[in-house]
Amino acid sequence: ETGVTQSPTHLIKTRGQQVTLRCSSQSGHNTVSWYQQALGQGPQFIFQYYREEENGRGNFPPRFSGLQFPNYSSELNVNALELDDSALYLCASSLPGASASGELFFGEGSRLTVL
Amino acid sequence: AQSVTQLDSQVPVFEEAPVELRCNYSSSVSVYLFWYVQYPNQGLQLLLKYLSGSTLVKGINGFEAEFNKSQTSFHLRKPSVHISDTAEYFCAVNPDSGYSTLTFGKGTMLLVSP
C-alpha cells in the first residue's frame, strides 16, 4: 500500500509567478485536503476535495485553487505568488468517514520558497 | 470557530524522563481531539485521537493523552521518553460533524537529550 506522495519536494519561485503542486493520495482514499505550514506555525487548512469537487475551504484567497482527478490525485495551484506564500504545503488523504473524524494521512510536503 | 493553544513552544527533557506536552482548546461546538507528530523533514503522523468514550486515550510509541472537558485540555504524556521521540508535536481539533477542517496549534518541539 503506497502512502501519500507529493511533488516537487522543493521549489523556488519569484513574486508574481504561478506554481502547481501535486499529490497522489493513499490507495483507496477519495478525499484530499491541502494545508499550508509556515515556518514555526501549525498547518492551516486551505481546502478539501471529495469526488472532484471542493468540499470546504479555509481562509485563503481565490488565487489558491485546486483540482481533484478521477484517480483521486490532486493539484494545488497558487497564482500571483507573494513572499508570504513561502511555506511547506502538505497534502492529506482520507476515507470520507475518517475525514470527518480527522484521521488524515499526510505526505511529506512540498517546500515552496518565494523570492 | 475553534482555536488551539500549545503552551510550550519547546520542551527539553533527558532520556528516560517523563514528559507532558500541554494543549488547551476553545470551541463553541463539540470537537474531536488529536495529537500529530512531525519528525524532521517528514509529514505529520497521527499519534492518537479522542472521539468519544474513555477520556484517557492511548496512542502509538507509548504516548497517551487525557481529555478534560471542564478544563478544555488534552495534554499529551509519556512516562519515559527516548531520543527517537525528538520531534514536533501538534495538537489539533475538528468539529464533530461535517468534513475535516483540522485546526492545529503552533506545535511543541520535544528535545530529548542523553
Image (cartoon, coloured by chain):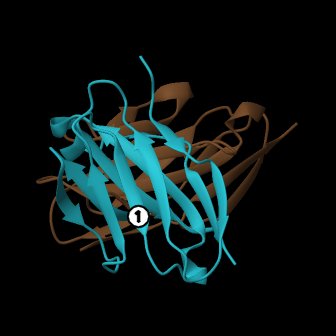
Chain colours: A cyan, B brown
- Which x, y percent locates residue A83? 61, 82
Can you name the residue that lies furthest to the left here? B97
- Where does the image place residue A113, in percent across and percent down from the top left? 66, 68
Residue A73 found in image quarter: top left
Q: Residue furthest front?
A: A17
User: Would you identify the image quadrant in which residue A54 lies?
Assistant: bottom left
Residue nearest the observer in this picture, B89 or B19: B89
Asked which secondary structure carries label 1, the reply is strand
Give percent across and percent down for residue A52: 18, 48
> Horizontally, is B102 left or right of B98 in the view?
right
Q: Quadrant of the C terminus of chain A?
A: bottom right
In this rendering, would B104 be left or right of B18? left
Which residue occupies 69% across, 61% down? B10
Above or below: residue A42 compared with residue A4: below
- Find disc 1 in the rendering and name its residue: A77
Which of the image's four quarters has the N terminus of chain A? Answer: top left
Q: Position of residue B45 (x, y in %)?
A: 49, 38
Is there any visible trace of residue B19 in the rendered image?
A: yes
